[in-house]
Every structure is written in C-alpha cells, then in structure tokens.
Amino acid sequence: MRLRHSLTLLAALLALALSCAAVRAEDTAWRIQVLPAVAVTAERVSLGDMARPVGQVDQKAWRRLSRIEVLTVPAESGKRYTVSRDNLDALLKRILGRDAELCLLPGQLVVQWGGKVVLEEELSRLAVDYLTPRLRQLPGETALRDWHLPAYVFLEEPGGAVDFELGSDLAAGRLTLRILEQVPGGKNWRRFNATVFVDQWTTVPAAGTPLNRGDVLTPDKVSFARVNLAYLKGQPWDGRSFGLRLVRAVGQGLPLLLQDLEEAPAVAKGDRLELVYQGRSVRLSTPAVALADGKLGQSIPVQNIASGRQVLAVVKDAQTVVVQ
C-alpha cells in the first residue's frame, strides 16, 4: 500500500516537473517562427537551424529548445526535402510536447542540403536598396508598396548572392523586377521574377476653369494639381507650350494631358478672313468665311461672302487666305 502511494506521489511530482519545464504559450510574449525554407550543411537539423524566436524572447528557454534535433536529412548536395504543414505540426508536437504550442508554422518547410537561402524579408530589403537611387531620377515623391516577391530563393553556392535588374521601364505603376542569382565570379546563374507598385506624386498643369472642346489654352485657363502618376492615363502637358487647343472637354482641376490637346490652327472654321486673289499684275481682295480649320500653308475651303462662291485658298496668316 505504501509502495503504491509512493509511486503515485512520484508520478505526480514528475508530471509537475514536466509541466514546469514546458513553456506555456498562453503565458508568454514570444513565439518561435519556423521558416519556410532553410539551407543546411549537417544531417541533423535542430530547431535553431529551422526557426527563429520573435517577440520578448525568453533566452533561457530558447537556448534549451534551439538545441533540440527535429529532422534528419541525407547529405546530398543541392537536394531538397519538403515537409508539409500537417506533418511538421505532428513532428514538433511529438518532439517538443507542449512547447510546440509556441511554434508558428509556414505552409510548408523546404530544406536544401548545401547552398544558401534568401528569404522574402531579405529580398525586400535588397530590392529597396537597388531601387532607391534609381527612383531619385523620377520627379516628385516616390513610394514602394504591394510587393510580389518569392517567399524564398535558394542559391546553389554558399558564397552566392542576389542582384536585381529592371524588367520594365522605370515609371510609376506596377514595376517588374528580375532577381538574379550571382555565383562567385559575378556570373548571373538564374532569374526569379518579382513586382512592386511605384507611387509617384508630383504637380502637373490642370484646367483652371471648365474647358470645352476647341478652347485654346492660354495662361489664365491653367492651374496646377498634385496627382499620383501611377493612375494618370496619359502623359501630362508640360505647361509651357501654349498655342494648343482642347480636343475634348476637361473639367476644372483635372490634369491636362497631351492626348487631350492638339496644335491650334491659324484659322478656325467660321473665322471671317480676307480672301486675296493674287495674279501676276493684279491683286484683289474680298471678305470670306473659313469652312474648315487650317494651319499656316495649308489649303482650306473658304466662301466668298460677296458671291457665295466656294474656293480653295492657302492660309497665309490668321486673317488672310490667298488664291493664286
């Protein structure tokens, strides 16, 4: 009877000791983030090889847990092994017990023997370093957002590195990047695609008043607006080259785009003009009306007001057309 009682007490004490040794997830302010991909050079993979602590880390507990071996992988250079989330969860629970509650799991874990892995967080930092000096070439203020990067990139060589090149023109909007794997010696080995959205805020000329089709731009009709070029559907007018007219109506405050403008004609349809008949020894003139727009040197139909006759005449200036 006493022996049974002693064994029961011993089991209770052992359970209490194990309970105290385990880290209760609900009582902690830190977690163990299992990485989505790791590169290893030893067959036995410990928790410290495949995870990192985050939050207010209990260093003593992490030192204990990081040394626990979780996986064993064959030493085959370049070989990759994939562990699903469910299998990883079951494996950690079996090996770590209640400490497994601390683990934050990826969708899967990919282990490569040898080489090197660059995770998304590092890829993002390197991409920002690459783009920042180049974005200074663009006018206004720029910002990067909505990254589409690989979750990780495996490099074949442990001394390898990643570089970048532009896969599309440097401009506001969705920008394509190529991630290059560089092996020692500077050779580009493999490429991976990525994208990022570039916001570019700048000030452009805008309609100072509501403008109608056919209105000619003059300085008093122009104001300025701050816009994100990523959403501007066209190239903005430079605000300096006047002598243009609208090919469509533009509301007050809206940007003036080159596609909305055309060179204003010297003569517009309906203008009253001087129609000159120029012969070798005689010059006659009479009032006329332009029946079409016309640029300098262009032939347009005009109507002689006196006779009602229509003729083709060459635009000499804004008030004169000539028939020779």
Image: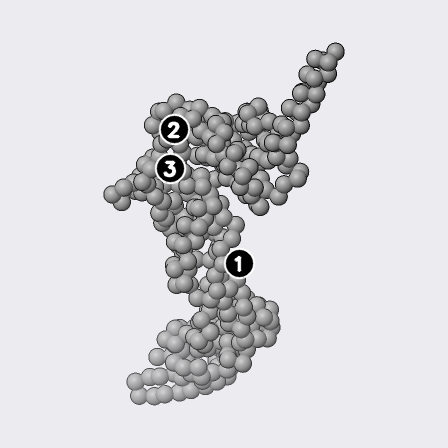
Circle 3 — which element? strand
Q: Earlier in the sequence, mark 1 or mark 2?
A: 2
Q: Residue at x 44, y 71 (%)?
A: 238
Indicate which label's residue lies in the foreground, 1 or 3: 3
Indicate which label's residue lies in the foreground, 1 or 2: 2
Front-lying residue, 60 or 140: 60
Residue 111 sits above or below residue 145 on the image: above
Q: Which residue is mark 2?
A: 42
The answer to whether one can see residue 302 in this image is no
The answer to whether one can see residue 276 in this image is yes
Front-lying residue, 244 or 187: 187
Circle 2 — which element? loop
Of all residues, the one furthest to the left in this rendering is 185
Name the amino acid, label 2: Ala
Q: Position of residue 43 (x, y in %)?
A: 40, 25
Number of other residues with Cα within 10 Å of mark 1, as a class: few under 14, some 14 to 19, many 20 or more: few
Q: Residue at x 37, y 75 (%)?
A: 297
Of all residues, the one furthest to the front in this rendering is 2
Name the amino acid, label 3: Lys
Q: Position of residue 270 (x, y in %)?
A: 52, 77
User: Residue 231 shows which numbered tag?
Assistant: 1
Q: Position of residue 46 (x, y in %)?
A: 46, 30
Front-lying residue, 96 or 72: 96
Q: CA distance from mark 2 to mark 3?
A: 13 Å
Residue 294 lies in quadrant: bottom left
- Report whether 209 appears left or right of 230: right
Number of other residues with Cα within 10 Å of mark 2, as a class: few under 14, some 14 to 19, many 20 or more: some
- Report whether 161 appears left or right of 139: left
Residue 130 sits above or below residue 113 on the image: below
Name the amino acid, label 1: Tyr
Q: Which residue is mark 3?
A: 116
